[in-house]
Amino acid sequence: MRIAYAGANYCWQYQPVPEPHEAVWLPLRPSIGEMFAETGLTPDWADALVIVLVETLPIPFDLEQAPCKT
């Protein structure tokens, strides 16, 4: 299965994707086409699109650089 994730991989909770699956992280953009275009793929590449919402308060300004909660 090919999985496209969009959102924030906070604390790398969605990595690694187990074999035999493939995954890509998409940058958030106004449209799905724009998100895929930045990765060099097209929307038909993915079998599933997962929108990841972070449930932390307060949400860090830069989720990818924030330290993980302990």
Image: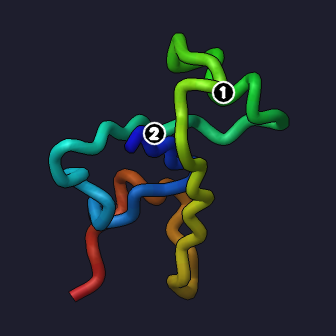
Q: In the rendering, at what x and y percent does residue 64 appear?
A: 39, 52
Q: Quadrant of residue 57?
A: bottom right
Q: Which amino acid is tagged 1?
A: Pro
Q: Nearer the viewer, residue 34 or 42?
A: 42
Nearer-the-camera pick, 59 or 52 = 52
Q: Residue at x 40, y 57 (%)?
A: 9
Q: Which mark is residue 58?
A: none
Return the residue at label 1.
Answer: 43
Mark 2 vs mark 1: in front? 1
* Image height of 1 relative to 54, above or below: above
Q: Residue at x 51, y 19 (%)?
A: 39
Residue type for callout 2: Trp
Of the pair 22 and 11, the residue shown nearer to us? 22
Q: Are marks 2 and 1 in contact (CB under 8 Å)?
A: no
Question: Which quadrant of the figure has residue 31?
Answer: top right
**Residue holding disc 2:** 25
Nearer to us in this view, 1 or 31 = 1
Q: Earlier in the sequence, mark 2 or mark 1?
A: 2
Q: x%, y% of residue 48?
A: 56, 48
